[in-house]
Image (cartoon, grey):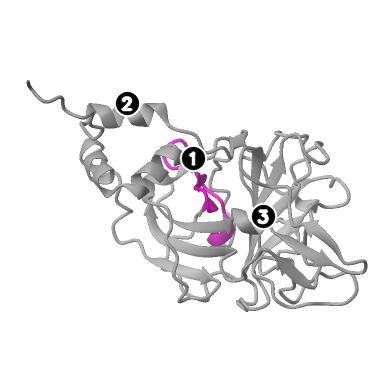
Amino acid sequence: MSPHLGLLIRRNPRIAAVLALLLGGTLAETAGAAEMMMYPTATSSFSWPTATAWAPISGLNDPNDGVSAPENDFVGDSANACAYYAMDSNYIYLRMRVQFSGTVDSSTFRDFHTFYIDRKGYGNENGLPDYGISWDSKSNDTSNHGLEFQIAPTSKPTTWGDLKMDDKDNSTGSKLIPDINGTATGGSGIASGWVSHTVGADGYIRTVDGQSTTNFGTTTYIDFAVSWNYLASQYTAYPGGATTNTSALGLNQQWYFALGTNHATTDHGYPSADIAGGANASTAFPSQGGSGWSSVVSTAIVPEPTALILLASAGVLFLPRRRSS
């Protein structure tokens, strides 16, 4: 389902109720699924999109590659997609599916999982990611790691397994400004303060286990949320005191996505465990939109005509009734 219809559903419980009847109850999450907040803390409160707000990301479905650590094996097909997205005016939401079939706890993930992003019409245009949104769970120290914002590598790798990204704050061991929810400051050249920014709501990560599929058995979702405010926020960088944009990502753009992961490794390592979209670590690094990259995804929030037709047919959209004279 389109994320735009999902946004409409989330804002109107009456619409959600009617659509639940029309679609045979597909608004419900998988029965028995357990949600666990992973970032910023295990007790963080956040309102995630409803089940039908997520739209599949075309081009990233992936077979079970038999990766030794199933939490590092991306899986998905036409029946149960490997990756999804949703968005509203506050956040971009991203979801990946991994083969892990057990019950997730605080020790399940000790690795990194990354959404690589290549913005169409921006930057290198040669297939390299412009940015990455990564979960670094190796140490489980969310004060210094966790949800990380990554920047483009300096050169094009030979294979996907040679790809290496660094965090925006240029730090491997702490959360500095301007990384997601970064508060600490570093040495010369590291940002010293936010402009028009409030730390604490930059981003979130959760897992949802117990996800039944047609062809992969039980799987687990890893969900990311990153605020548009963070992506558009500014910081003051030294030396020189220049105010600099944090990223070139925002609404009304076109993005390609790729997925990468590795076991027992921080997000500064190489994605040698698995790449989605039918690619793997030994796949030659492609040009823009090539093997391992998704189809283009638009970040524009627009009305959904088919949703309006469906709602109108259900009697949810009402015109004022003319009084009889």
Q: Which residue is mark 3?
A: 231
In this figure, what is the number of numbered marks? Answer: 3
Q: Which residue is mark 2?
A: 309
Quarter of the rendering containing residue 231:
bottom right
Q: CA distance from mark 2 to mark 3?
A: 34 Å
Q: Is residue 252 left or right of residue 248?
A: left
Q: Is residue 229 above or below residue 78?
A: below
Residue type pointed to by label 2 = Ile
**Chain part drawn in magenta:** 70-96
Q: Residues within 10 Å of mark 3 (few under 14, many from 20)?
A: many
Which of the image's four quarters has the C terminus?
top left
Is residue 84 one of those drawn in magenta? yes
| Residue 273 appears in view | no
Mark 2 touches mark 1? (CB < 8 Å): no
Q: Which mark is residue 56?
A: 1
Q: Is residue 215 left or right of residue 205?
A: left
Residue type pointed to by label 1 = Pro
